[in-house]
Amino acid sequence: MDLVVMKSRLDARQLMIVDSEVRNQGKNMILAYVLWYFLGILGGHRFYMKKTGSAIA
């Protein structure tokens, strides 16, 4: 099912709940930069951002 169609079926309260869940599960870019600064040579920031392939490489 298309995401636009699914989203159009939600009411305002449900959209707010979905939006808050997406924001809560998002990655913190500041933490990614801190990991890059201290663990960049080991790929720590890439593991945090779920890019394990390039982190291992």
Image (tube, rainbow, N blue to C red):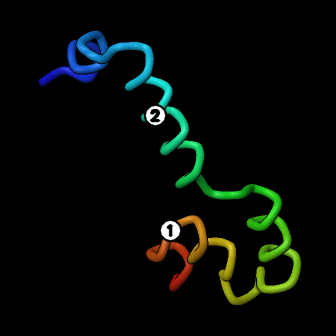
Quick one: 34 or 54, which is closer to the camera? 34
**Closer to us: 29 or 13:** 13
Pick the front one: 17 or 2? 17
What number is the disc on residue 29? none
Q: Is residue 33 above or below residue 2?
A: below
Q: Check the image and report above or below for 25 versus 31.
A: above
| Element marked by disc 2 | helix
x 34%, y 14%: residue: 11
Residue 12 on image: x %, y % = 43, 14
Relative image position of residue 24 (x, y in whole percent): 58, 51
**Residue named by callout 1:** 51
Q: Would residue 10 appear left or right of 35 to someone viewing this image?
A: left
The residue beneath circle 2 is: 17
Q: Residue at x 19, y 20 (%)?
A: 2
- Rendered image quadrant of residue 13: top left
Q: Amino acid at mark 2?
A: Ile
What is the residue that sits farthest to the left in this orientation?
1
Which residue is at 87% across, 76% downward? 37
The crowding category of the residue bearing disc 2, from other C-alpha atoms within 10 Å (few below 14, some 14 to 19, many at least 20), is few
In the image, residue 36 lies at what x, y percent? 79, 73
Mark 1 surroundings: few (<14), some (14-19) or many (≥20) residues within 10 A: few
Picture coordinates of residue 56 (x, y %)? 51, 85
Marks 2 and 1, how far apart in space? Answer: 27 Å
Q: Point out the tag, 2 or 1, that comes first from the N-terminus.
A: 2
Instruction: Determine whether 8 is above or below 1 in the image.
Output: above
